[in-house]
Image (tube, helix red, strand yellow):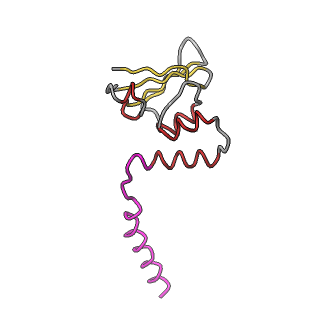
Amino acid sequence: MALKLLVAAQVFVVAAAPWGCVNLPRSAFASVRRAEYFASHGELPPGIRTAIENGHVLVGMDREQVIVVLGQPLRRALSKRNDNAEAWIYRGYKLHQDPFHLQGAGLVRIIFLKGRVAMIEPLW
């Protein structure tokens, strides 16, 4: 009897597993990232907090804040000349800033110096 109950429970779990794999819109993942970040980082400068809420990346943000806004980059590259420089590549549509979003930048490069955003540039 216990074996039948165990098998029935396993069948139910396997059959019910796809229900948990609902396709969520990408914006839902960004919302979850923001909520988790704000919960663990209570005090933020108001400008940074507003930018994160609006899906913007600002010069001066750190790597973690950029990931909260945009998710993981398509590619990361370390500078061969400067140990403190790094470039991340994102699809342009992910940035909600008007200069990049409205002009249809295909890719955007975010350059970090010493772990902070130093420049954001479109790669047409």
Identify the residue at horizontal 43%, vertical 20% (top origin): 121
Vertical relation: 69 (above or below) 111: below
As rendered, which of 5 and 94 lies closer to the eye?
Answer: 94
As rendered, which of 114 and 119 lies closer to the eye?
Answer: 119
As rendered, which of 3 and 49 lies closer to the eye?
Answer: 49
Looking at the image, the residue that sits furthest to the bottom is 1
| Magenta segment boundaries in residue numbering | 1-28
As rendered, which of 31 and 109 lies closer to the eye?
Answer: 31
Vertical relation: 78 (above or below) 92: above
Identify the residue at horizontal 58%, vertical 13% (top origin): 82
Vertical relation: 83 (above or below) 18: above
> Relative to 63, is 105 on the left or the right?
left
Looking at the image, the residue that sits furthest to the top is 81
Rendered location of residue 84, percent (x, y): 61, 19
User: Quadrant of residue 61 in the image?
Assistant: top right
Rendered location of residue 117, percent (x, y): 55, 24
In the image, residue 101 lies in the stretch drawn in magenta: no
Q: Main secondary structure of the magenta part?
A: helix
| Tally of marks | 0
> Relative to 44, is 90 on the left or the right?
left
Rendered location of residue 98, percent (x, y): 39, 28
Vertical relation: 73 (above or below) 81: below
Identify the residue at horizontal 38%, vertical 31% (top origin): 91
> Relative to 13, is 35 on the left or the right?
right
User: Quadrant of residue 100 in the image?
Assistant: top left
In the image, residue 19 lies in the stretch drawn in magenta: yes
Rendered location of residue 81, percent (x, y): 56, 11
Identify the residue at horizontal 33%, vertical 20% (top origin): 124
Looking at the image, the residue that sits furthest to the right is 43
